[in-house]
Amino acid sequence: MSVLNVNKENFDSVTGSGQVVLLDFYADWCGPCQMLSPVVEEIAEEHPQFVIGKVNVDKEPELAQRFEVLSIPTLAVMKNGTVINQSVGVRPKSEILAMLEG
């Protein structure tokens, strides 16, 4: 499965799927976000049981505020519309998978 571009218009349909959802809050100008992006994309390809989405904080400030994103990259894991895990900064693939499998 590919990474979804998440915005306020499709947010409810993405997070309300009943599946575990990983949201990657990022910005195009953010170096650490660029380092994390290939890892997130790899997880999306290898683990289709998860919904993987990216939220550009510059284009979606309301979503960033809703999740209290103060630093990027921020990863939020959701299930049934509720955040069950969250981390800030670049994380290795193994840690992200552990967050998802929680």
Image: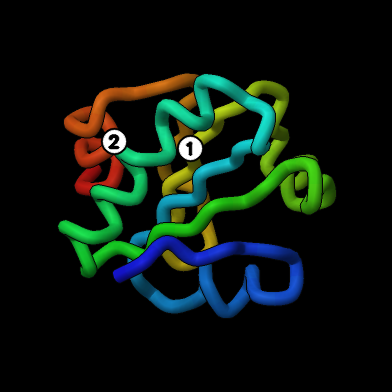
Crowding at dot 1, Cα within 10 Å, few <14 / some 14-19 / many 20+, comes out as: many
Vertical position of residue 100 compared to residue 20: above or below: above
What's the amino acid at mark 2?
Answer: Ile
Q: Give the residue number, with chain letter if any, for mark 1.
A: 75
Residue drawn at point x = 43 percent, y = 47 percent:
77
Q: Is residue 71 above or below residue 36?
A: above
> Which sits in the foreground, 66 or 44?
44
Q: Position of residue 63 (x, y in %)?
A: 74, 51
Distance between the Cα atoms at labels 2 and 1? 8 Å
Residue at point 51% right, 44% down? 24
Query: In this image, 68 relative to 51: left or right?
Result: right
Q: Residue at x 68, y 47 (%)?
A: 56
Residue 96 is labelled as: 2
The answer to whether residue 35 is left or right of residue 101 is: right
Residue 14 picture location, percent across and down: 52, 72
**Amino acid on which disc 1 is placed:** Leu
Q: Earlier in the sequence, mark 2 or mark 1?
A: 1
Q: Is residue 70 left or right of residue 96?
A: right
| Residue drawn at point x = 50 percent, y = 50 percent | 23
Dot label at residue 97:
none
Q: Residues within 10 Å of mark 2 (few under 14, many from 20)?
A: many
Pointer 2 and pointer 1: residues touching (CB < 8 Å)? yes
